[in-house]
Image: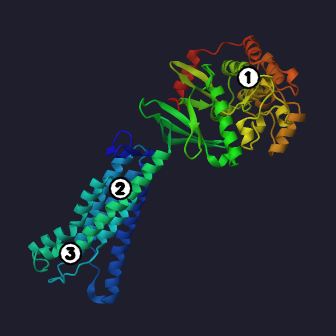
Amino acid sequence: MIASGSGNLATRGRAIPADLLKEASIRLGILALLAAAVWIVATIGGHLAVRAMSPGAGWLWFGVPDVIAALAAAASIGLFFYTRRTKRDPGFILNLGLGYMILTSLAIAHLSHWDPRHETMVVVPTISWVGVVLIIFAAIVPTSRRKTLIAGIVAASMNPVVMLVSRAQGTIEFGAPMNALAMHYPDFILVGIAVVISQVVTRLGQQIGRAREMGSYQLGDLIKRGGMGEVYRATHRMLARPAAIKLIRPEMLGEQGEASALAVKRFYREAEAAATLRSPHTVELFDFGVTEDETLYFVMELLDGLDLETLVREYGPLPSARAIHILRQVCESLEEAHVRGLIHRDIKPANIHLGRVGIEDDFVKVLDFGLVKTVDSNGVPEHSLATELGRTPGTPAYMAPEMALGEVVDGRADIYALGCVAYYLLSAKLVFDAENTLQMLAKHLRNDPVPPSLKSGVEIPRALESLVLACLSKKPEGRPQTARELSSALAAIRVPEWTQGQAADWWKARGALVA
């Protein structure tokens, strides 16, 4: 059946993912546009051919075949534009495509058997253009066997029906009425083939849907793609709870055998550690695991809003009060992680989400705690899964000098990165500009940062600017030593408090929150 609410096509309980149905509806639109072009070109080409073979025959621009072709072309163009409407239900569009297939078959039958110049037909079994249309649609429109069979029989019947109507009107003659069916029985054979092809296409979609199942969750649309994997919308199959799933494909592991097994074991350990975090400002981890094809996955809460990188890029520097409000919430998330022996190592604007939780606006969620670095019982940092995957942890524009040097790091590396985030929020500029990664890392190691107020031209309280620059100290000893200490220092800065009313007004002025 077609589930009109979700756009999923289900056969025997197995649904085809909505994005695949959407792609199929787009292909249907492209097919309709090509059909329109064929109707137009074939009509004009037919007149040119008749003119070339019979110069005195005339153009006959307004004959019945031209009207039929024009109507078929118009219907095809209309279907194409209809499929381009983004909010159309793909399942309904594919059902509409079956109706379009029948109408197309009717138009072909009229052109084939509604010609007053033919008085007596020679009945020879043949595969008509209707049969070709049936096969093409079966390969494009995934649907149930029953619908394919019914729509196919109706479409294949168009030729015999039009022949019988034409015979009744005296337009053509072909002997016994059963000759109409005998002439086009090959098209009915193609209906059976079309059912088989449609089921193959449908099952391929179902297999993709099965492969996308992560534990109790079913994957939906792609949200974003990054260096460590992809993030999809997802739904719990029983609770209908929305979620986001981050996937790390098997090819990201690089190694096989024991190295791959070690990476999976490390993934479980780090995910279990991340799942213990309970700060409301840390994204909640619902589930994690490894699929049959060794794809690693995290199931997280689905958030409304946008990340800080998008916020600053689209709306510019933030007021100091709002920046402090955001940074203190990040500090709360980091403090819990650091106390539990977890170092994030990739704090950056893209990993800090701002939005609504419950009735509270400008609520911060820190993302990507799934691939953190853990510290063992002796205080020695262990290799993380990111290192196991052969990746340099962190983002160069927000990387602490000790990380760039490959030294042992602790929570103060996250403090440095948060200082870079604060710099970006207040100035809409990076701490350092560079043409490549090596230059960026070199500047973090050697260069002193320019005060953010000089880059943005926006007035920043001196105490706040001094605190941000302290976070950017080359030596960990020169920074605030803990996230709690940094939060207390931010709270002591005398600026008007950023209120919930201001936050709600800001979001309201810019429309609904974006997922």
Q: What percent of the width, then of the height, locates residue 186?
A: 26, 73
Mark 2, residue position: 79
Question: Mark 1 against mark 3, which lies toward the viewer?
Answer: 1
Marks 1 and 3 close (CB-CB < 8 Å): no
Q: Mark 3: which secondary structure?
A: helix
Residue 312 in view, yes or no:
no
Q: Amino acid at mark 3?
A: His
Q: CA distance from mark 3 to mark 2?
A: 26 Å
Q: Is residue 234 visible?
A: yes
**Relative to 57, does residue 239 appear above or below in the rendering?**
above
| Location of residue 445 by image quarter | top right
Q: Of circles 3 and 2, which is in front? A: 3
* Image mark for residue 113: 3
Residue 317 placement: quadrant: top right
* Amino acid under disc 2: Leu
Please name the amino acid that badge 1 sits on. Answer: Gly
Q: Which SS class for mark 2?
A: helix
Q: Label 1's element?
A: loop
> Residue, x 13% and y 77% (percent of image)?
171
**216 or 415: nearer the viewer:** 216
Q: What is the CA distance from the residue labelled 1 to the residue labelled 3? A: 80 Å
Residue to which mark 1 is pinned:
341
Which is more toward the observer, 328 or 118? 328
Is tag 3's residue or tag 2's residue first in the polypeptide sequence? 2
Q: Earlier in the sequence, mark 1 or mark 2?
A: 2
